[in-house]
Structures are given as structure tokens and as C-alpha cells.
Image: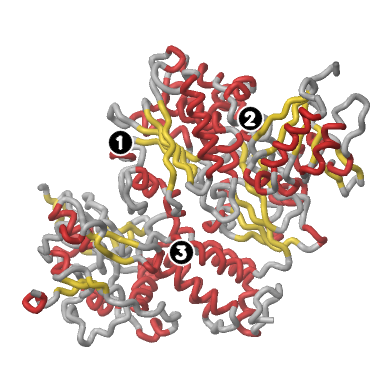
């Protein structure tokens, strides 16, 4: 008998599944039996391991042997390599082009070791559909600890940690909880916002798919802290794996007594229900999301209005946080506020999770400490731009964010720096663009998205975003007019100032930031009928 | 209701506590552009035209903010103009109909806003044209709906809700294709026609009832 039992982790994140990871796992299971290796190794499916660019991924623990772009044809070789003395399957290892060597363990791959995976600690490691895996990884310890604390002690801990909401607005989580706990009433609600709708963003989905129990645990702790007994997890209908795995996790948590009545003998009752969104970007806005759960059309309500922590779902005090915000809570309770606050910058604590995509060598799901420089994310973790092309811009914050040029690469990534540069943290989308990207075309793409997703109730957003889109569309088609740049700036300013909700108030950001940093490209299109990036076919 | 004083454009104005800034200004004869405000209905601040500037420079929708003793507000300022004027210009550009022949002409809220802001037609002309005209919807035997005139102020919806408990009319569609339609059973409409009566721009058009029968 071999001396050690191996675990073959097969990534079953959405990216790897689309690359055939489902069939791969079946083939591995079948071959394992065929080669009579069941005593040597077990196969485990996990959530997103992060390095989506190289999927489907297979990791063999305990060594952390890292096989990339694995197909069913590779199965016999992988299993053969488990035999004593057998070599690794070198062709599947990550090949580092800097040191010109294959790397054996993912721990030594730059994409991984330059990150700090705290919230993602279990993603790609545990089986999200097996609560025992989560428990073995220290799961629900924070809940046990929290239930022995007073609610106000928990709120103080969260406040002291400096955690800010990771859905986009960056509101201090502890203050939100405090406000809800002080709102009068016996009925309160917890809502988890998993309505991630930014083009190119998949970080909330990956957390829900990879480590659903950490989100549930965070929600239960939040419920205990504010005195709520019911939680809703609002998940996009377009995320079938996330809905399925969260559903399995909720059921298992109920069976083990982490959800339901008298949780862990504490007399505290709490349950979570999944609510599937119907596919509207604007439903990520808190007041629209609440209306959507109530069965109404998701339309944001104008300020001034009572905060959701006073009048929220069904008119009751409600705490609404993002998926990643809840996933941070067990960490803070387990390790303490000081531990958490020691990470990050003065005003942005902890880590940030990004979906790194676009023209970058290593696309994937990453987690870095707040304050990490854009350059480190894109070049050290992301591996730079493929094909030796030049970096042009990076878009953060999805359609509400802005495009930042190369001069900004040394900027630390935190809530306030990004906002002051004309972009935003948003929920964690990060799209890298190279020299072959036309910035006018990019602005047009995002405005096309927002003008279609506008809920239509306020005039500046409804007509203004459509008008901005039409202007951008005519510019890339070579029909731009002198004065269009000023008109875009004028409209952008008006829409930002006067729109009803954050969708409208941030919708012009892609246009305003590209004019701010890439005005010459607009001018080339309008005055010379020329697209410098060679993208717009009418302007060549 | 206790009385208090607020300062609008440098003039002290009497206000009733509980009233909004917009209500107070209108009662004092001080016009602030607005389209979605309707006396007696809950203000929703959808049109975004009633922006006023607070002492600290912040722009707020005056239809939703109650007066506070000693409040100092401006109804005209460069910042307000930069925010509001493009919105009105866009609205006019997307408003397909000409005023001549419109049943609302003469008592149209959009005309009032236009003349108050002295909208410059030249500035409207530089905007890109709106999408093609849409057909008029036959709502029921009593009234029709012209999506080309509609400013989506929501007054019809809130009126129906206020009178009948739940609105039969609601928004459908997204973005610039949003319009108002019967949501559910249009046969339940009691044809009180209050929605038609309150429509500020002649979007809801009462049919000749005698002819309809």
C-alpha cells in the first residue's frame, strides 16, 4: 500500500465546467476504478480554483501538484503519475516563461503566491457541496464563537475591523449593522446581494459556487447581531451552479442545526431562503432589489428616503450586504478585528477580490490586499499583456467604472483612490485592455449596456444614456461631429448630477474617464475619421 | 401645522412644517420646474427637474425634501442649470409631437418648463435624433396612450393607485423603450379617467365616449 492517500481536486467552477471539467471528473472516476487506485486517491470536486485561463484545472494534494488545461485524454497519465516512483505529467504543469521551467506546485506559481487568499481560502480547496469539508476547514467555528458573544460585541468587532461593503459603494459594514440593530421592531431581515451583473465580473458567483457556507455563516452572524431571523440570498437566475450549490449548502446547514430553530442550543433562530433574480442589472441597487423580492418591478427609490436599515424589505429594518462582505465575517470573528484591520490601507481594510479578465495573460479570480498597486495585479499576478503588446488601460468597477491609463498603474487599489481617479471599486470587475483596444468603442460598449439596463423611470438616465450611446455609436461609424466631445461631457455631467440612483449617477463614468485620459482617440475619430487602434471599421 | 420661514432665492418665505420645498415655493408663487409632481400624490422625484441648491452646494430634489426652519435654498444657479437643462433638452428631442394640435397645448407642463428655462431650439437640434415613432396604444374603450408624448412621470400610475388601492397601469419595458400599459386585467379599469385628467402632457387621450358606444 502506498504511504499516503492523495486527493485529486477537480475544479468545477463555471469556467472549468465550460471547458469540460464535468466530463473530466467522470473520466477520472472511471479510470481510478479501472486502474484499481481507489485506495490510493480520492476525487473531490471543488469550486473555482482561480486560474480560469488555464482551466480545466486539476490539483493533487497534499503536494499541490498543479495540472492545467486538462482534457479527458490526459486522465490515464495523471492517474499513472500517482504510482510510486512515477514521474509527473510534465506537459500539463504550468510552464513559467520567466524561469523557463515547469512549476510543480501551484503554491509556487506567481499567479497564486502573489495573492493573499483570505476570503477565497476555501475556494478550489473544499467540496462546496459537502458541509464536512467546510467544517474540517474551520467552518462554523465563527458562528459558535459569535453566539457566545453579545450582539453589540459582534457589531463592535465588525466596526473595529474597518470592513467596508464590497458590493461597490463601500459603506462601513459595522455602521450598517449598528443602524439596523438600533432600528425598532421585532422583525428584521438579512439580505445577501448576489445579483452580480457587471459584464466581465464573476467574483460573487465564484464565492457562492466555491464556498457557499462561508456566506451562510456570515449571514447567520449578521442575523444574530441585528436580531433578524430570516435571510434572503438574492442570486441571479443566470447563475445555475451558484443557486444549486447554495441550495445544497443551506439544506446541509439546516440538517446540522446551523440554520433553523435554536441554532447550536443558543435559542437563536435563523433561516435562509434563496431568491432568484429575473435578470435586471438595476436590481443590484438596494431599494430595487428589495422591491424585486417583494414581487414588484425592481426600480430604485429616490433620495431622500429612509435607509434600508430603517425601512427595508416588507417595510422592516434590513441589512443588505454583498456576497463577499458576508464571506469576510467568519474571518473577522475568528481572527479578531485587529487582525483584519492590520491588512489594507488606512481607509480600506482587508482584501479585494477581482475578476481579472481581458487582454491579460492570466485571467482568473484573484484576491489581493487593499492597497496593492494596479501594476502588481496586472503584471505580477496577471502576467502582463499577451503577445508582447502594450498595456493601454484597465477598466474597474464594470459599466459604472472608468478606464485608467498606464500613468495610473502605480495607483493603489482601494475604494478612495479608484474613485478619485474617475473610476470605482465596484463589485470587483477588472478588464485589461491592450493597444488594440479602441477606447471610444469600449465606452460605447458600456453605454450600450447601461442604456439597455436603465429602469426607465428617471429622464436623465433613460434618455441621457441612450443619447450618449447614439453619439458614441456615430463617432465610431465615422459620423462624429465637432462639438461631440463637449456634448458628451455636458450630458455626462448632467446625468451624474441629476440621476435618481447609482446606476445613472455612474453610467457616464466610462465615457468621462476615456475622454479624460484618451481624448486624442475621440479627436482622431471625429476630425480625421481615423481609429488609432484600428478597431472601428468605418474609421480606418 | 406650525408655521416657519425659509429663504428661497434671498427672499424669506412662509412655510408650513411638513410641506416640501417644492410645495412651499409653488405656494409662494416661486416656480420650480417639475413634471412628475402632482398635488395630493406621493412625490417620487422621477423627472429630476425640481433640483434646488442647498446652502452647502448640494443639489436635491425639492419635491421630496420637507422644509426645515431656516433653510436657505436657491432655485437658480449655474450648477442647477448644468444638471437640469440637458435633461429638458433631451426630453424635448425625444418628444415626437409638435405642440400645434396637441390636446394638452396651453396647459402642458412641458411647455411651462420650456418657457421658464427659455429652452434654446438650437441646443436641442445638436442632439442625435430619437428612435422611430411608436404606434399609439389602444388602452381600452375609454382612452388611448401615445408613447411618443409620454414623459413617464408616473402620475397616471400613482393616481390609479391612490384611487383604487392598486394601480392597473404600470411601467413595462426597459430603458428608453419603457412605457405605461395595463398590467394585468384591463377590464378591471373603472374608467374613472382621473389618470387622463391628470396627465400633464396629453399622453393619455380620452376617446369620444359616445362614439365608442
Question: Alpha-carbon neighbours of circle 3 within 10 Å: few (<14), some, or many (≥20)?
Answer: some
The earlier-in-sequence mark between 2 and 1 is: 2
Disc 2 and disc 1 in contact, CB within 8 angstroms: no
Classify residue A181 as left or right of residue A84: left
Name the residue at 77% across, 46% down: A69
Task: Report which residue position mark 3 lands on.
Answer: A452
As drawn, the label of residue A444 is none
Name the residue at 82% across, 41% down: A74
Classify residue A96 as left or right of residue A238: right
Task: Report which residue position mark 2 lands on.
Answer: A127
Question: Alpha-carbon neighbours of circle 1 within 10 Å: few (<14), some, or many (≥20)?
Answer: some
The earlier-in-sequence mark between 2 and 3 is: 2
In the image shown, does B182 or B2 lie closer to the viewer? B182
Separation (CA) of disc 2 from disc 3: 38 Å
**Image quarter of residue A205:** top right
**Above or below, comparing residue A69 to residue B161 in the picture:** above
**Above or below, comparing residue A524 to residue B140 in the picture:** below
Q: Nearer the viewer, mark 3 or mark 1?
A: 3
Image spot of residue A325 (x, y percent): 52, 36
Task: Report which residue position mark 1 lands on.
Answer: A316
Question: Alpha-carbon neighbours of circle 2 within 10 Å: few (<14), some, or many (≥20)?
Answer: many
Secondary structure under badge 3?
helix
**Above or below, comparing residue A375 to residue A243 in the picture:** below
Separation (CA) of disc 3 from disc 1: 31 Å
The earlier-in-sequence mark between 3 and 1 is: 1
**Chain label for disc 3:** A
**Chain label for disc 2:** A
**Chain label for disc 1:** A
Classify residue A502 as left or right of residue B38: right
Q: Quadrant of the C terminus of chain B?
A: bottom left
Amino acid at each position: 500500500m502506498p504511504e499516503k492517500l492523495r486527493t485529486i481536486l477537480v475544479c468545477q467552477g463555471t469556467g472549468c465546467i465550460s471547458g469540460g471539467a464535468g466530463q473530466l471528473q467522470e473520466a477520472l472516476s472511471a479510470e481510478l476504478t479501472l486502474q484499481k487506485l481507489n485506495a490510493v486517491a480520492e476525487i473531490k470536486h471543488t469550486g473555482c480554483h482561480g486560474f480560469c485561463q488555464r482551466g480545466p484545472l486539476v490539483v493533487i494534494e497534499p503536494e499541490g501538484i498543479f495540472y492545467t488545461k486538462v482534457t479527458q485524454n490526459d486522465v490515464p497519465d495523471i492517474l499513472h503519475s500517482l504510482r510510486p516512483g512515477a514521474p509527473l505529467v510534465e506537459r500539463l504543469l504550468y510552464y513559467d516563461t520567466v524561469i523557463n521551467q515547469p512549476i510543480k506546485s501551484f503554491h509556487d506559481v506567481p499567479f497564486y503566491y502573489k495573492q493573499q487568499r483570505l476570503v477565497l481560502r476555501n475556494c478550489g480547496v473544499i467540496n462546496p457541496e459537502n458541509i464536512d469539508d467546510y467544517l474540517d476547514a474551520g467552518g462554523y467555528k465563527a458562528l459558535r464563537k459569535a453566539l457566545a458573544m453579545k450582539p453589540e460585541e459582534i457589531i463592535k468587532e465588525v466596526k473595529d475591523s474597518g470592513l467596508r461593503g464590497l458590493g461597490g459603494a463601500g459603506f462601513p459594514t459595522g455602521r450598517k449593522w449598528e443602524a439596523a440593530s438600533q432600528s425598532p421592531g421585532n422583525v428584521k431581515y438579512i439580505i445577501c446581494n448576489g445579483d452580480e451583473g457587471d459584464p466581465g465580473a464573476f467574483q460573487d458567483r465564484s464565492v457562492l459556487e466555491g464556498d457557499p457556507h462561508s456566506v451562510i455563516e456570515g449571514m447567520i452572524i449578521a442575523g444574530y447581531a441585528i436580531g433578524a431571523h430570516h435571510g434572503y440570498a438574492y442570486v441571479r437566475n443566470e447563475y445555475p451552479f451558484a443557486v444549486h450549490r447554495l441550495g445544497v449548502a443551506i439544506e446541509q446547514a439546516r440538517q446540522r442545526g446551523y440554520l433553523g430553530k435554536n441554532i447550536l442550543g443558543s435559542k437563536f433562530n435563523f433561516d435562509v431562503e434563496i431568491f432568484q433574480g429575473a435578470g435586471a442589472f438595476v436590481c443590484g441597487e438596494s431599494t430595487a432589489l428589495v422591491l424585486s423580492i417583494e414581487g414588484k418591478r425592481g426600480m430604485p427609490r429616490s433620495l431622500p428616503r429612509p435607509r434600508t436599515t430603517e425601512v427595508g424589505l416588507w417595510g422592516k429594518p434590513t441589512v443588505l450586504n454583498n456576497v463577499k462582505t458576508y464571506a469576510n465575517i467568519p474571518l473577522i470573528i475568528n481572527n479578531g478585528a485587529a487582525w483584519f484591520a492590520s491588512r489594507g490601507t488606512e481607509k480600506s481594510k482587508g482584501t479585494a477580490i477581482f475578476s481579472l479578465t481581458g487582454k491579460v495573460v492570466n485571467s482568473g479570480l484573484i484576491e489581493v490586499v487593499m492597497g496593492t498597486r494596479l501594476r502588481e495585479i496586472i503584471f505580477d499576478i496577471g502576467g502582463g499583456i499577451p503577445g508582447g503588446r502594450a498595456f493601454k488601460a484597465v477598466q474597474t468597477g464594470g459599466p459604472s467604472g472608468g478606464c485608467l491609463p498606464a500613468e495610473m498603474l502605480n495607483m493603489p487599489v482601494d475604494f478612495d483612490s479608484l474613485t478619485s481617479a474617475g473610476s470605482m471599486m465596484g463589485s470587483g470587475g477588472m478588464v485589461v485592455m491592450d493597444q488594440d483596444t479602441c477606447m471610444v468603442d469600449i465606452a460605447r460598449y458600456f453605454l450600450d449596456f447601461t442604456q439597455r439596463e436603465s429602469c426607465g423611470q428617471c429622464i436623465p438616465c433613460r434618455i441621457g444614456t441612450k443619447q450618449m450611446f447614439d453619439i458614441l455609436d456615430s463617432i465610431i461609424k465615422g459620423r462624429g461631429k465637432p462639438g461631440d466631445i463637449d456634448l458628451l461631457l455636458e450630458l455626462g455631467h448632467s446625468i451624474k448630477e441629476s440621476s435618481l440612483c447609482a446606476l445613472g449617477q455612474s453610467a457616464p463614468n466610462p465615457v468621462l474617464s476615456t475622454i479624460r485620459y484618451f481624448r486624442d482617440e475621440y479627436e482622431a475619430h471625429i476630425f480625421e475619421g481615423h481609429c488609432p487602434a484600428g478597431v472601428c471599421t468605418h474609421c480606418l | 401645522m406650525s408655521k416657519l420661514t425659509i429663504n428661497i432665492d434671498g427672499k424669506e418665505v412662509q412655510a408650513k412644517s411638513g410641506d416640501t420645498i417644492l410645495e412651499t415655493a409653488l405656494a409662494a408663487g416661486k416656480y420650480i420646474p417639475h413634471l412628475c409632481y402632482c398635488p395630493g400624490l406621493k412625490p417620487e422625484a422621477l423627472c429630476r427637474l425640481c433640483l434646488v441648491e442647498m446652502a452647502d452646494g448640494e443639489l436635491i430634489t425639492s419635491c421630496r425634501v420637507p422644509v426645515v426652519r431656516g433653510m436657505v435654498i436657491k432655485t437658480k444657479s449655474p450648477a442647477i442649470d448644468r444638471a437640469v437643462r440637458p435633461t429638458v433638452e433631451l426630453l424635448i428631442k425625444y418628444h415626437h409631437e409638435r405642440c400645434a394640435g396637441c390636446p394638452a397645448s396651453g396647459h402642458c407642463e412641458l411647455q411651462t418648463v420650456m418657457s421658464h428655462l427659455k429652452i434654446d431650439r438650437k441646443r436641442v437640434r445638436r442632439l442625435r435624433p430619437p428612435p422611430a415613432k411608436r404606434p399609439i396604444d389602444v388602452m381600452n374603450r375609454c382612452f388611448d396612450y401615445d408613447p411618443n408624448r409620454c414623459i413617464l412621470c408616473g402620475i397616471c400610475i400613482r393616481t390609479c393607485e391612490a384611487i383604487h388601492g392598486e394601480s392597473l397601469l404600470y411601467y413595462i419595458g426597459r430603458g428608453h423603450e419603457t412605457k405605461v400599459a395595463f398590467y394585468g386585467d384591463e377590464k378591471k379599469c373603472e374608467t374613472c379617467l382621473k389618470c387622463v385628467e391628470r396627465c400633464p402632457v396629453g399622453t393619455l387621450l380620452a376617446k369620444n365616449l359616445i362614439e365608442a358606444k
